[in-house]
Amino acid sequence: MIKKTHVMVNKPEISVRYLADYMAASERTRRTIASSIKFRPIARLIQHTEARAALTDFFVGGKTDANELIAKSEFIRNKLADDDFDLTVNEANADYLARVSQILGDLTLPDANLSFAHKFEHPAINGVTVKFSPHIVLDRITKTNKTKRGALMFRYSKGKPLNKSVAKFQSAAIFGVLRDVTAQTDSDEAEKALCLTVDAYTGAVYPAQGDAATDYLNMKAALSSIAERWDKIPPPKNAVL
């Protein structure tokens, strides 16, 4: 029996992260991304879930001591692993935290309240479900007693700074989706300066820019295109469904 390698996602969906990658990519790479989100590999993938959770605890808790990240990194690195894959996952998460401990002094977040992110609604935008799962939410009260809100998402690739164009689109997506999925009033609204993508490799913090609303409109147009051709997106080469 031939072993299956991928499972097909029947209805169009994409995460905010991959949407940012898609927007900054060449047309050829866009086709690869579209194929990867429609046809998901069955094989286990290395995730940085534990490292991101540790960073969320660290920043929401108002901590500043890099030694705490180093200790957590070593704890993860030395955990018992059931197999080689789990060992690789532990190493990847440990390396992530070790790197943040090195660049912590370069990572400056805005003056705002930081809280654990609740589960957000995944909005359907132009026929595509956009998966929105920020790691931290931010808020601040203005001098006129208005509440400004935002959200933060970490990005990390070992040995590689985050592409600035990707970061720009991701922060714009955070701003646009947050504005769309939360009930807004004149005294409670999303703020670009609080909608952040954080490069955990360099410590660079990318807030949504002045043209974030325009970028978001362009993303909506791209989502329409994805929805229209979803059924025609081919699987990856040699994929077995």
Image (cartoon, helix red, strand yellow):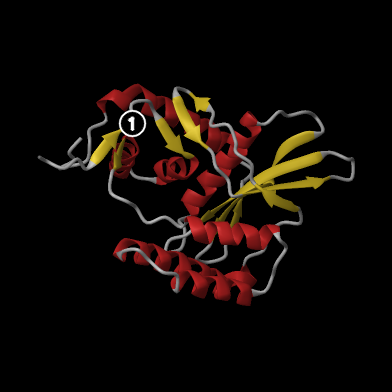
Which sits in the foreground, 36 or 71? Answer: 71
Where residue 57 sits in the image (x, y, percent)?
A: 64, 59
Could you tell me residue 73's position as x and y percent? Answer: 51, 71
Question: Residue 181, located in which quarter of the rendered image?
Answer: top right
Q: Can the viewer see residue 33?
A: yes
For the C terminus, the quadrant is top left
Q: Residue at x 49, y 33 (%)?
A: 130
- Residue appearing at x 61%, y 50% in the figure: 196
Residue for point 21% across, 43% down: 5
- SS at mark 1? loop
The answer to whether 175 appears left or right of 4 in the picture is right
Task: Classify residue 240 by image quadrant.
Answer: top left
Instruction: Report the number of discs.
Output: 1
Q: Nearer the viewer, residue 117 or 79?
A: 79
User: Around disc 1, counting alpha carbons within 10 Å, would you say few (fewer than 14), some (14 to 19), or many (20 or more)?
Assistant: few
- At label 1, the amino acid type is Val
Left or right side of 237 for 82: right
Can residue 158 be seen in this snapshot?
A: no
65 versus 137 height, above or below: below
Q: Is residue 75 left or right of 25 when viewed as pictured?
A: right
The structure residue drawn at horizontal position 33% and vertical position 42%, both measured from the top left corner, is 33
Q: Is residue 210 above or below residue 225?
A: below
Which residue reaches farthest left? 1
Question: Which of the 4 image quadrants contains residue 104?
Answer: bottom right
Which is more toward the observer, 163 or 9? 9
Q: Position of residue 178 (x, y in %)?
A: 63, 36
Report the residue marked by disc 1: 9
Q: Nearer the viewer, residue 135 or 231?
A: 135
Q: In x, y percent, where is residue 223? A: 43, 29
| Apparent side of residue 152 relative to residue 241 in the rendered image (left or right) | right
Q: Looking at the figure, which quarter contains the N terminus?
A: top left
